[in-house]
Amino acid sequence: MLRSLFISLSESRGLRSFAERSSIGQKVAARFVAGIGVEDALRVAAALNQKGLSVSVDNLGENVTNPDEARASAGLYHQLLEQIAVRRLDANVSLKLTHMGLDVEEQLARDLVGGLVKRAAAIAPPNFVRVDMEGSAYTQRTLDFVHELHRAPGNQGCVGAVIQAYMRSAEADVAKLLAEGIRIRLCKGAYKELPEIALQEKSEVDASYVRLMKILLKSSVYHGLATHDEAIINDAKAFATREKISRDAFEFQMLYGIRRDLQLRLIKEGWRMRVYVPFGTEWYPYFMRRLAERPANALFIARNLLRQ
């Protein structure tokens, strides 16, 4: 019930307008979003690197409505890739295809994202572009994009996909990605989907996540386990130890501003940790979908907003 509520709230224009203007909304944004511009994201990335944390930077936004918006979004990612290289940051980038114009013109999105992956691959050392997953209307198109990009000469290892564990197609999609050695970020899923398409019960989603996690860890491809669920994290650690999987063969991933204590603890234990750092003005729908992904985060966030 809470999950559906947060997803509905993420789509409310009125509440979004209020949240973005209110002081409490701005406080939330400051805690969980790096800032408005590229320089804000780079500053936060550098600070996290100093603590031993890797970073994935995301310019928030999706479903642009004209080519100029898409090109502007791609331009920001080119700036990010350039500055990450210049500043020698341990960081890569994440993007959504609809932010690159997929709803406007598929070829436009193909050209823009292809250009970014090509640039990432040309940097020394090569960088990496994660293509984020959106709602089920985009699932197959997104996966097709990633397969196509990865097959292009020189792109191997420089582009990856996201799999949402609650999708009933997840295991088959994982198998196809692994057949081509494509890196995967595994998450639970943050969109409202029909029962025919996606698992609805938390216990089922958790079981699917753990099952897929074990497949990924044994694949010999470098993957990211995106979760704040400490029980699942402990399962992953125990499985990796039992199967003699090196601690640098994969990474845990968490959101900026959430479970910072656990992030640092994992680093101290010798595990790899990447922090997903969003920036930009489109923070409200992002924030609400993160609550939908794990409603228990709402209480955690409320407690932390009262702290200095």
Image (spheres, helix red, strand yellow):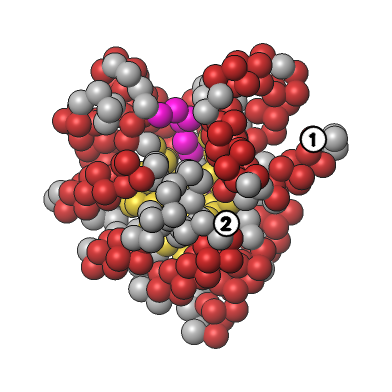
Residue type at mark 2 is Thr
Rendered residue at 58%/66% (across/down): 203
Q: Give the secondary structure at mark 2.
A: loop
| Nearer-the-camera pick, 161 or 138 | 138
Q: Measured from the top left, where is residue 133 in percent x and y?
A: 39, 45
Q: Which residue is mark 2?
A: 227
- Write down the quadrant of residue 111 in the picture: top left
Residue at 49% of width from left, 84% of height from top?
Answer: 243
Residue, far left: 153
* Numbered range of the magenta stretch: 55-62
Locate the C terminus and report the quarter of the image it occupies: top right
Residue sitting at 42 percent across and 62 percent down? 223
The local crowd at label 2, few if under 14, some if 14 to 19, many if 20 or more residues have their Cα within 10 Å, is some
Whether residue 57 is in magenta: the answer is yes
Q: Is residue 238 above or below residue 87?
A: below
Decide which of 74, 121 is in the foreground and name it. 74
